[in-house]
Image (cartoon, rainbow, N blue to C red):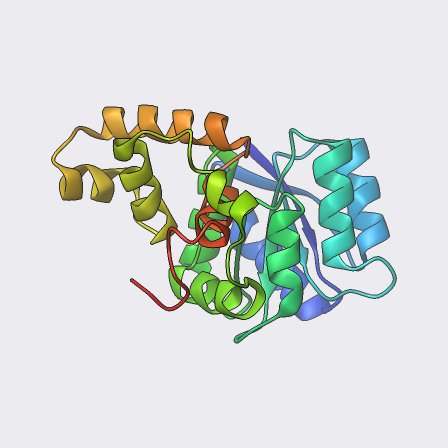
Amino acid sequence: MIRVTVADDQAVVRIGITAVLDAEPDMTVVGQAADGETAVAQATALRPDVAVLDIRMPGLDGLAATARITAEVPATRVVVLTTFGLDEYVFAALRAGAAGFMLKDADPGRIIDAVRVVAGGDALLDPGVTRRLIDRFTGRPGPEEAARLSGLTPRETEVLLHVARGLSNAEIAAALGISPATVKDHVARILAELGVRDRVQATIAAYEAGLVRPGAR
């Protein structure tokens, strides 16, 4: 059973997400919050598998709450919510340790998938939104950022490029003519080499190092 907490200051949104998740046989919402402080307190007390957080909440916002939850309750994975379009807080939330983000008006099925993916230890990216965010908040890479990828093999660099483009392991395997298990091994080594926790932060590192250019596919 995947244990989830939901934080959003809009009661209709919070109740709606809770209803969607609670209806799944493998999920249960163990806490709801209308602000970031309560969301952090619930994560600390309840230790959910996934915390779904709105970015903009009164008092402690979703960004600060994400940073505290990932630092104080590392076993809890965070999915942040954003409105349609660019939101400067999302990029910072990802860097703070969020395992993914999604649009608040997403189809309910995508919300369910997001929770399952993140609970399973992976990360969820919307490639289009990610690209626009990084386009806005990532500048020209400097020597330090570019050197960060120097420890990767050519094959690992190739796999990272596909990860940064939003491809799944199965899609990467098909593109490179290797098995999904081999891709999984490559991804694990990439995360270890870059010192990041998941595919989201690996994608950010790829953009920051200039491996992928904003707007490129």
In the picture provided, is 134 more to the left or to the right than 189?
Answer: right
Relative to the observer, which residue lies in front, 175 or 113? 175
In the picture provided, is 193 more to the left or to the right than 177?
Answer: right
Q: Which residue corresponds to the image point at 42% horizontal and 34% vertical from the top-left?
A: 150
Q: Quarter-wise, where is residue 46 in the image? A: top right
The picture places residue 126, in percent across and down from the top left corner, at: 42, 59
Q: Which residue corresponds to the image point at 40% horizontal and 66% vertical from the top-left?
A: 128
Q: Which residue corresponds to the image point at 23% horizontal and 41% vertical from the top-left?
A: 172
The picture places residue 168, in percent across and down from the top left corner, at: 30, 44
The picture places residue 66, in percent across and down from the top left corner, at: 71, 48
The answer to whether residue 123 of the structure is visible from this angle is no
Q: Quadrant of the C terminus?
A: bottom left
Q: Is residue 163 above or below residue 212?
A: above
Relative to the observer, which residue lies in front, 73 or 186? 186
The answer to whether residue 26 of the structure is visible from this angle is yes
Q: Quarter-wise, where is residue 43 in the image? A: top right
Q: How many marks?
A: 0
Q: Is residue 107 above or below residue 25?
A: below
Relative to the observer, which residue lies in front, 73 or 206? 206
Q: Which residue corresponds to the image point at 50% horizontal and 52% vertical from the top-left?
A: 208
In the picture provided, is 81 more to the left or to the right than 26?
Answer: right
Residue reaching furthest to the bottom: 85
The picture places residue 164, in percent across and down from the top left corner, at: 38, 50
Relative to the observer, which residue lies in front, 162 or 65? 162
